[in-house]
Amino acid sequence: MDPIQQLVIDRLEAMDKKFDDKLDKILVQTTKTNGRVNGLEQWRRQVDKLIWWVVGAIVAVAAFFIQDWVNNH
């Protein structure tokens, strides 16, 4: 093989290795980020459920007092 051809092939292989290394790093970081995002989404769903339970309890208590007030007046 011609030395120039070999040089071009070597350079292309080096570039390919750089891209592979960068893609591997991107994959690792993306996986970590997705794990954190999934955890935050799960936490948010739990907080939303808690908020709705609290709002529901407040509405139920308010309805009880309104009904009691209407019945006594």
Image (cartoon, rainbow, N blue to C red):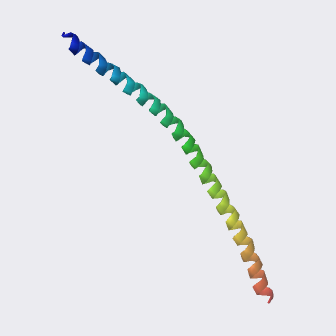
Between 29 and 39, the residue placed more toward the observer is 29
Q: Position of residue 34 (x, y in %)?
A: 51, 40
Whether residue 46 is situated above or below residue 72 in the rendered picture: above
**View extreme (bottom): residue:** 73
Residue 55 picture quarter: bottom right
Name the residue rendered at 29%, 16% in the picture: 10
Whether residue 3 is situated above or below residue 24 in the rendered picture: above
Image position of 50 (left or right of 32): right
Q: Which quadrant is the C terminus positioned in?
A: bottom right
Q: Position of residue 32 (x, y in %)?
A: 53, 35
Between 51 and 60, the residue placed more toward the observer is 51
Between 73 and 41, the residue placed more toward the observer is 41
Residue 14 picture quarter: top left
Between 63 and 11, the residue placed more toward the observer is 11
Q: Which quadrant is the N terminus positioned in?
A: top left
Image position of 17 (left or right of 29): left
Name the residue rendered at 70%, 63% in the picture: 54
**View extreme (right): residue:** 72
Residue 62 picture quarter: bottom right
Q: Position of residue 40 (x, y in %)?
A: 59, 46
Whether residue 1 is situated above or below residue 44 in the rendered picture: above
Name the residue rendered at 67%, 57% in the picture: 50
**View extreme (front): residue:** 4
